Image (cartoon, rainbow, N blue to C red):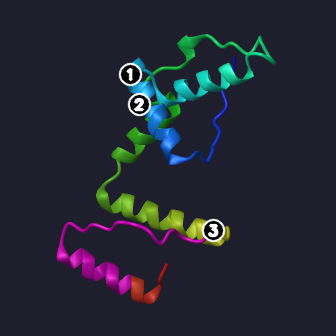
Amino acid sequence: MALSRISNTIPEDLIVEADRKAGALDRSRSWVLVEALRQYLAPRVASVREPEAQYVVGLGPSRAAQLEADLRLTPEERVYAAERKLLVDEARGRPPTRDRLLTFDRYEDYLEWQRREAVRPW
């Protein structure tokens, strides 16, 4: 059975409870949420049962491959990739996130960032 990735907004207290339940059962958060949805739908749709073996803890193959590719980049290449993503988002009309944590290995890197920010603020 094919899987679909979705994005939901869920109250934080429910996520905390789902994570607590997942830890107690040694399962992933996704597994707990799928089981909750199955239980909710069970009286109406009895045939929605998927084999539990499809839900494994850890990264999926595409996410693992992306992480490995990202880790092969040098720190400078990662910074440039992040800047390119911001430019693409900006071109698509997506406002950049203002809440961000910036760290610098050297003071000179910070000064360079400040110089770039003065030229092109995000």
Quarter of the picture containing the N terminus is: top right
- Nearest the viewer among 21 and 100 is 21
User: In 3D space, how far apart are the residues under numbered discs 1 and 2 (Cα atoms)?
Assistant: 6 Å
Q: Residue at x 38, y 21 (%)?
A: 24
Q: Are marks 1 and 2 in contact (CB under 8 Å)?
A: yes
- Nearest the viewer among 15 and 97 is 15
Q: Which residue is drawn at 77% across and 11% down?
A: 47
Residue 72: give x, y in percent of width and height: 34, 45
Circle 2 residue: 20
Residue 89: give x, y in percent of width and height: 60, 66
Q: In this view, does 58 lie above or below 109?
A: above
Residue 4: give x, y in percent of width and height: 67, 31
User: In 3D space, how far apart are the residues under numbered discs 3 and 2 (Cα atoms)?
Assistant: 34 Å
Q: Do the residues labelled 3 and 2 touch (CB within 8 Å)?
A: no
Left or right of residue 42, residue 81 in this image: left
Reading the chain from its start, which is encountered first: label 3 or label 2? 2
Residue 106 belongs to the span the image colors magenta: yes
Q: In this view, does 115 lie above or below 39?
A: below
User: In 3D space, how far apart are the residues under numbered discs 1 and 3 (Cα atoms)?
Assistant: 39 Å
Circle 1 residue: 24
SS under mark 3: loop
SS under mark 2: helix
Q: How crowded is mark 1: few (under 14 residues within 10 Å), some or many (20 or more)?
A: few
Say what amino acid the circle numbered 2 marks.
Arg
Q: Which residue is drawn at 18% across and 71% down?
A: 106
Reading the chain from its start, which is encountered first: label 1 or label 3? 1
* Front disc: 1 or 3: 1
Circle 3 residue: 94
Say what amino acid the circle numbered 3 marks.
Arg
Say what amino acid the circle numbered 1 marks.
Ala
Q: Give the range drawn in magenta.
A: 95-116
